[in-house]
Image (cartoon, rainbow, N blue to C red):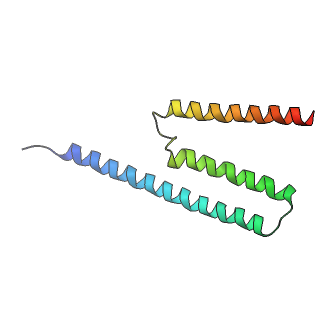
């Protein structure tokens, strides 16, 4: 006779973990839809550009964060190298944009 209690515990743990992950992804997806609707409302209402652009940029940054951490699974172990590459690319793009901004406005 074999003892399957260890296997059942592992299966139960994995099912619980998968369920929690799916809940997090659904909540993240719902929040991204709400943020998208807010962005459309900001644009449709004709809000002044000085106010609208920072709101839209903040919503975009939050959505990129959701994409990285929930849909690309960047929060999981083993994703250190892709994280370093993505953050390095973001940093390089930021520096390039700042440099071009300084050259343009100088």
Left or right of residue 8: residue 33:
right
Q: Residue at x 20, y 46 (%)?
A: 5
Corner quadrant of residue 84: top right
Left or right of residue 30: residue 60:
right
Corner quadrant of residue 38: bottom right
Callout count: 0
Quadrant for the N terminus in the image: top left
Left or right of residue 9: residue 43:
right
Q: Residue at x 39, y 49 (%)?
A: 17
**Horizontal and vertical percent for residue 82?**
53, 33
Q: Residue at x 33, y 48 (%)?
A: 13
Closer to us: 101 or 33: 101
**Residue farthest along the left direction in this orientation:** 1
Closer to us: 9 or 70: 70
Is residue 60 shown above or below 86?
A: below
**Horizontal and vertical percent for residue 101?**
84, 36
**Horizontal and vertical percent for residue 66?**
58, 50
**Residue farthest along the bottom direction in this orientation:** 45
Quadrant for the C terminus in the image: top right
Q: Residue at x 63, y 52 (%)?
A: 63
**Horizontal and vertical percent for residue 77?**
46, 35
């Amino acid at each position: 006779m074999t003892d399957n209690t260890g296997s059942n515990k592992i299966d139960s743990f994995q099912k619980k973990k998968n369920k929690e992950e799916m809940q997090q992804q659904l909540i993240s997806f719902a929040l991204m839809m709400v943020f998208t609707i807010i962005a459309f409302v900001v644009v449709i209402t004709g809000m002044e550009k000085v106010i609208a652009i920072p709101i839209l940029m903040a919503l975009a940054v939050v959505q990129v964060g959701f994409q990285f951490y929930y849909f690309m699974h960047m929060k999981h172990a083993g994703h250190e190298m892709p994280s370093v590459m993505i953050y390095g690319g973001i940093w390089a793009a930021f520096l390039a944009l700042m440099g071009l901004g300084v050259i343009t406005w100088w």
